[in-house]
Every structure is written in structure tokens, then in C-alpha cells.
Image: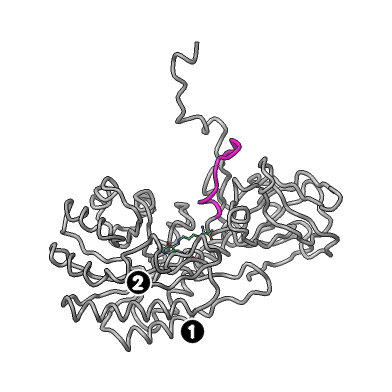
Amino acid sequence: MRDFENDHGMMIFGGMKAAEIADRFGTPVYVTDEQILRGNYRRIHQAFNKYMPTEIHYACKANTNLAILSILNQEGTHIDAVSIGEVLTSMKAGIPPERIMYTGVNVSDAELKALVETGCRINVDSESELERLAKITTDIPLSFRITPGVASGHSAKVMTGGKGAKFGVPFSRAVDTYARAKDLGFEVKGIHAHTGSGGLSTEPFTDVVEVLCGLVNDIESETGIQLEFLDFGGGIGVPYKMQEEEIDMDEVAMEVTEIVKDETKIKTLALEPGRYIVCDSTILLTRCVDVKDAGPKKYVGVDAGFNTLIRPAFYDSYHYVAIANKFNKACTAKYDVVGPICETGDYLAHDRVLPDPEEGDVIAIYNAGAYGFTMSSNYNSRPLCAEVLVNEGEAELIREPETIEELWRHQIIPERLRR
Ligand code: LLP
């Protein structure tokens, strides 16, 4: 897990004192280090492209901030999008539609029509979607998401590739579906599968690539379709705990590309990392507002709850916690870090040893860049928080904090209720 510099007890993030960023922009606030973000993209891009041409489709569901997308656009990223909203947001950040691949599930006709208008690539999830798309157009290149029968992930909630999953064309229907697409007049270019999200083992990647390579050859021999690209999805986990090891990207790249080159005539590989690119680029800063000794438990009460970061409450996910203005000070006791939401399930961390927390301290929650802000909500009528970008000692606001008035902007009180 990535840790940060300590300057006389102050945590340094992106060349700045984290506590000063909190003072300047208020809390809670998500803070992203541009250099880490660019470094993550380059590391994964280089690892694969060393062996064969590989497109990195950043899974923007992890973080759709326009400034972050603009940075990744400068790096040359492709995009994995899951909704028309993500497609248009990526285009707004300057990413051309040819570099955006849409992979949806249970896609409506209205969404299909809107997607076709954008000119993005469509990765079809089902036979029903194929037939409905054919009624709109057959004049676009296609690929299919296949259910590979390989599942991975940090929680059952995010495993997507197992047999019987709601995602993808069932494996047993794959060859017939490619044949049907050809009959309908589509040019079918690729094959895709995604096993799940956030596991730290490399096996699912080689397993799913083996499955897809077998299918590529079956499709060619039974339908005559020669596929050009193979996309093995996202899901590369990152360590959230100090003692966890990170996945060796070079090893994954070498193994995966070797299988593809040995077994198929595929020219281009694609993968869809979300977490790997943004997770450790961002910390969430939240201020301690209350310290409570409740007998068997001690609490650090902070101003971010599961409205701001839902992963601990929703998946029981672990996020490392430090006090940014008492960085590397001796720890005194165990605390739960809890937020302002009126539910017992509202917590950011359980049983953490921390250095004598006090009101006003700035708490840093690590690895908050993936599925942090994008999963935040207005629950308890709390406005969404700000986002800040830091780059070599300079900080810029990249999202203004929402106001309470903005929570009402789409609501209507019927005239008869105003009397
Ligand atoms: N491709 C597809 C088709 C996906 O469904 C996903 C994630 C990805 C790529 C990117 O996966 P990644 O590389 O980020 O693991 N909210 C959960 C994670 C949900 C992931 C959903 N799909 C979390 O906070 O852990």
C-alpha cells in the first residue's frame, strides 16, 4: 500500500501538507495527486504494450470527475463506460467517441438510440440487446460481453463473471450469438468478459483469457468471423492494508499476452482497469468534530459518513486511516471512526489504533479515489463534498462543494400544497 511523507508530524500529499489543504478547502474533501494518477496509468499501459498492442479502457465508473478524465485523456486513455451519462461525461472531457466502449447491462432502447448517436463503440450484453440494436442500426462495429464462468472480487457483491451471472451472453450461447450478429449484417470485431472487481490474485486473469481464447477460435471455425480484439475486463485489485502486496503488473501482462499470442490471431488486447488507475491517487480528508469514550468503545466522530464514502458500510471494506496533523505519532488507543449519518452502520473504520485524537484533527482516509466520490449521496440531506487536485505543491478546486439550496433544485411543491 502506498504511504506518504512525514514532515515534522504533518502528512505530505502531492507536495502539500494535507492538513493545510483541509484548512483551505474545508472538509470533507477528496484530494487527488495528479502525479500518482498519471504514474498509475503509465505503469499499466507500459506493462502490456511492451508485449503487444493494448488499449487501456479506464473504467470511469470508479471516478468521473472531468478534471481526472481530462488528465487521463492527455495520457491517451480509452474509456469503459456503463451508461449514456458516462459516455457523454467522457466526451465532455475531450475523449473522442471512438475511444469509448460502452458495456451496459439491461440496456433500454432509449439508451441504445442515444449511444448510437454519440458514435461510441458498443459491447453487447445479451441476445435481446443485439436484436433491439439491429432495429436501430447494423452499421456499427460490435463486440460481445460473454459470461466466462470465472468470478473474482473483494466481495460477493462485485463478482460478475460466474456461471449464471446477470452479466453477458451465457457462454453456451456465445457462438450462436456471433453467428446471428453476422447474419444481421454487423461487423463483429471483438470479445469481452469481466470477472469481478478488486481481488488480489492474478489467476482469474489468466483463467478468463484462456476461456476467451478458446471461444475466439470456436467462433472463427464455426462462423468464419476473425475477431480483432480481446478485452479481458477490469478488476485489478490494489492493496488497502499496509501488509498487503500489490499485483505484479508485468507478470500479469507477460502471462496474458503469451496466452493470446500463442493461441489466437488476435491483434489488439484491451483491459478495463478502474480501481488500479485512481484508487491510491486520492485521499479523503475529514475533520474530527467529536471524541467520545462510550465505555467498551471509543469513537472519533468525523464530518464524513457513508454519504461521503460508502465502501466501509456497504462492502465492509477496509480503508487505512491516519491523523494528518499527528502523522507517525505514537498511537494511544483503539477507536472507531464514525460519521454524522443517523445509522449505526455509518462508519469509516473499526478498531484502529490512533494517536490521541482531538476535535479539529484532520483525518486522512487512504485509497479513496475509486468508487469514493462516485458512490457518494445526499442521504440525510447532506450536500456532496468538494474535490481538489494537487500537483507538485499546487492545489486547485476541481468540484465545488454542493450547497443545501442545490438539494431542492429539482423538487416541485404543487401549487395546491403551497396554500
Ligand atoms: N469493466 C467492467 C465491465 C466492470 O463492471 C468493472 C467494475 C470494471 C471494468 C472496473 O473494475 P475495477 O478495475 O475498478 O475493479 N463499487 C465497487 C466496485 C464495483 C465494480 C463494478 N464494475 C467497490 O467500491 O469496490
Q: Amino acid under label 1?
A: Glu
In the image, is 132 to the left or to the right of 233? left
- Magenta span: 372-383
Residue nearer the viewer, 165 or 104: 165
Cβ atoms at labels 2 and 1 below 8 Å apart: no
Check the image and name the residue furthest to the bottom.
262
- Please tell me whether residue 33 belongs to the stretch shown in magenta: no
> What residue is at 19 percent from the left and 60 percent from the top?
140
> What residue is at 48 percent from the left and 80 percent from the top?
203
Residue 261 point in image, percent of width and height:
32, 86
Whole-Å distance between the Cαs marked 2 and 1?
A: 18 Å
- Please tell me whether residue 373 belongs to the stretch shown in magenta: yes
- Badge 2 marks a residue whose secondary structure is strand
Number of marks in the image? 2
> What residue is at 58 percent from the left and 40 percent from the top?
379
Q: Amino acid under label 2?
A: Asp
Label placed on residue 231:
2
Write down the residue under mark 1: 251
> What residue is at 54 percent from the left and 30 percent from the top?
405
Residue nearer the viewer, 337 or 210: 210
Q: Is residue 314 above or below residue 57?
A: above
- Badge 1 marks a residue whose secondary structure is helix
Quadrant of the image for the N terminus?
Answer: bottom right
Q: Is residue 254 above or below residue 406?
A: below
